[in-house]
Image: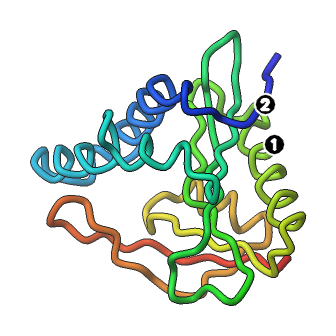
Amino acid sequence: MIAYRDAVPADGPELDAMAKAIWLETFEHSASPENVAAYLAYAYGPDGHLMRELGDPERRTYLAIDDGRIIGYAKLIPPWLAEAGPGDLQLSQIYVASSHHGQGVAGALMDWTIATARAAGAKALLLTVWENNHRARRFYDRLGFVHIGDYGFPVGDQIDTDHIMRLAL
């Protein structure tokens, strides 16, 4: 049975390893080895973005755990996108291990994200999704997110196009 709970700093190493594996599985094919290495150095490891943000009280990370292992997470943050309005929040990441696709994990994580944003009084939830991540894009479309713009996402010195999506709450 899959359990859900808020992340704590002690979850950092396991969460980091799981997130890195999912990122590689999903995106590694789309960039040169040098750009992949640059992004991994920025995002993961003891000095990476994910670990540094885990203890930040303005950022909430919610975990999906199966058989004692982290198999997914969602991270809700204050928005950094220019398209954000007053009171909006941003879903920074929602990752689910491919072994658990189709089991309702992403839906449960998104339910938490939307409920948490609403409880905080957010008027909208924003996110970015890589233009070629069709599976994720279909998921967000089904939930009612609307494409409102594009963002240049750096992977090393490569700039990918992410779609900025918004869900009115």
Front residue (pair 141, 23): 23
Left-right relation of 2 to 48: right
Q: Position of residue 6 (x, y in %)?
A: 72, 37
**In the rendered structure, are the residues bearing label 1 and label 2 in contact, judged by CB atoms less than 8 Å apart?**
yes
Type of the residue with mark 1:
Ala
State which quarter of the image contains the C terminus: bottom right
Front residue (pair 105, 90): 90
Left-right relation of 80 to 45: right
Pointer 1 residue:
108
The tag on residue 43 is: none
Residue, x 56% and y 53% (percent of image)? 93
Above or below 167: residue 28 = above
Numbered circles on residues, count = 2
Residue, x 67% and y 89% (percent of image)? 85
Type of the residue with mark 2:
Tyr
In the image, farthest residue toward the left: 34
Pointer 2 residue:
4
Q: Position of residue 156 (x, y in %)?
A: 18, 59
Q: Position of residue 18 (x, y in %)?
A: 47, 28
- Going from the N terminus, do you reach mark 1 or mark 2 first? 2
